[in-house]
Amino acid sequence: MKPTLRRNLAVLALAWLTAAVSPALAQSQPPGVKGPVPTGMPNRLAVGLFEEAGQNWMRDSGVPWDVRYRYFTKGWVDNWGWGQPDGSWGKAFLDESKTQGFLPAPVFYQLFAEPGGGEGESLAKVQNAATMRGYFGDLKILLQRAKELGKPVLLHIEPDAVGLLQFQTNSNPNAYAAIAATGMPELASLPNTVAGWGLAFLQLRKSVGANNVILGIHISAWASGKDISCCSVTDPLQPEVDKVVNFLKPLGLGTNVTGATYDVLVGDPLDRDADFYKLTRAQDVWWDASDNASISSRSFNRYAQWLTLMNQTTGKRWVLWQIPLGNSQHRNINNDGSTRAGYRDNRTEYFFGTSGDAHRRKFANTGVIALLFGAGAGGQSSYPNDLGADGQPYLKTHAAPFLLAGGLTLPATGTTLPGSGGDADGGTGGGTDAGTDAGTRDGGSGGTDAGTSDGGSAARGYGFESSTEGWSSSGAPLKAATSSTARAQAGTRSLAVPFSGTSGTGVVSVLTAPVPRGATVTFRVWIPSGSGITAIQPFALEGEPGGWRYTGRWTAMGSLQTGTWNTVTVALPTNSTTPLYQLGVEFTTNSGWTGTVHLDAITW
């Protein structure tokens, strides 16, 4: 790496929240997030780690991590000379990750080790036809092995390389690069330009048919020529964002000849622990973690604002990658594997410490869909020995309750999450911790069955016999809900919820639902066969008096039956407040499906 730094669930509640969260969080509340969560990524905030091939710390940790990443550097294709040049080593990492239950995330980091120099020669390398022929040949093999996996793969393309190419071309995407000149048939229609280099990744995915691959393009915080994360902290952010986006549009962020664009943006908040820079290079790169920090300061707030502007300008969500693992207990020594060896940083404590819930929501509202932690160089802090003040591994013990409770559902396109009502334990509250953490992820066990019509009517609740009764749809996957006679679980009508053909997450809900304290709400849901739905989540959201507490039941499609009525229940806490701010059902779909779901007899 470059060593010199480089749910929808209560968007309507935002006006209420200004007084419920800290001033800086309220003032910096971003507009509705742009862009869908890519198909194949979970619709909740993913948390992952770097892990070397063949290791099993993640598997044995007892924590349901989401993503497992590893660098694929020059030589990976033949196991650095120990195998055939067929990508078998890479396939083994993908298979291993899949078997252990993780989404594999190879980091294609090959350009800097291609012959002809280092980072400073990036442009010269992409201008060499022979180099690019071998380079893209290796990429093609990786895409073929990923396609064979048959499950989603997050492929992160060349950390820092795009930023270096912007710098070395003086922001000229039309500078020469050998793309069609490689002689590869798949690339023959692409221009011999740096823009063509960016498009080649998209074109090869298309030609291989690796539709399960999620492509992430790396955005360096210094790519505009000003490092907005540490050094140019008083410069306005939008001009710097525009410089980078204008360069990247022809490389695949904008409409192009391949017919596809990159799926996500990838950023690294810092490539080493902050105190490593302070103690070994006399550079102060610490971020102010205060929620009141000015965006014109070296702070998490400034970085969050940059992420927001990038999301709003590109329409793409973010993966934050290689987040340093240092905490306040590290001994500020080179990590030799002993207890607390490594350097101090504050990023794990920011996301999983006392105010972790609020900070996770804040960053989800900037477009972040994943937090991936890992050391960016040798000697840095790492998760096996990052013991906190209690003597327990810090990230493991603080991320575990958050992930085991279901995590945090991401905001739907055009919405933001409500702020936190407080999280003194870094996220152990799961689905009832004063916000939109995603309930108990039990796959619906004990709470779902295939219901049958009893011909009755809703006693206390919603039957939709004369109207939608105030229920409405939001989110790109859903069209307007209507009262329909097409089918009914009770009476003669139900609420029809049509899908638009856009993948992602949508919500159908009602405000000010008069559900009594501690009630159990029963939802009846009818889903047709062949739907693109992957999960549903009935939920109840309390308002300000209840600290914006969220209670939901995440239910995988595998726990539901199609072509019949399913019953899913949500039990509210005994001290829940009434009326509820919002009562509803969240639907997640991973395909362009255009069918209709029905709700009926929602009772308590």
Image (tube, rainbow, N blue to C red):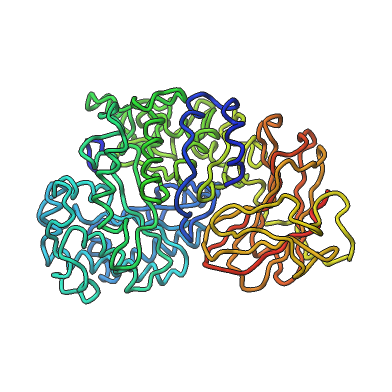
Q: Is 163 positioned to the left or the right of 414 in the image? A: left
Q: Is 269 positioned to the left or the right of 468 in the image? A: left
Q: Where residue 461 appears, x then y in whole percent?
A: 82, 50
Residue 522 visible in the current orientation: yes
Q: Is 323 positioned to the left or the right of 541 in the image? A: left
- Residue positioned most to the bottom: 185
Q: Quadrant of residue 124?
A: bottom left
Of residues 13 and 286, the one drawn nearer to the viewer in this rendering: 13
| Vertical arrangement, residue 471 with respect to residue 143, above or below | above
Quadrant containing the N terminus is top left
Of residues 486 and 199, the one drawn nearer to the viewer in this rendering: 486
Q: Where residue 370 appears, x then y in whole percent?
A: 46, 47
Q: Give the mark count.
A: 0
Residue 447 visible in the current orientation: no
- Residue positioned most to the front: 466
Q: Residue sitting at 37 percent across and 31 percent down?
A: 302
Q: Residue sitting at 43 percent across and 66 percent down?
A: 212
Q: Where residue 181 appears, x then y in whole percent?
A: 13, 70
Of residues 22 and 148, the one drawn nearer to the viewer in this rendering: 22
Of residues 415 and 335, the one drawn nearer to the viewer in this rendering: 415
Q: Residue sitting at 34 percent across and 42 percent down?
A: 268
| Vertical arrangement, residue 282 with respect to residue 476, above or below | above
Q: Is 109 positioned to the left or the right of 469 in the image? A: left
Q: Residue sitting at 41 percent across and 43 percent down?
A: 373
Q: Where residue 282 appears, x then y in whole percent?
A: 23, 23
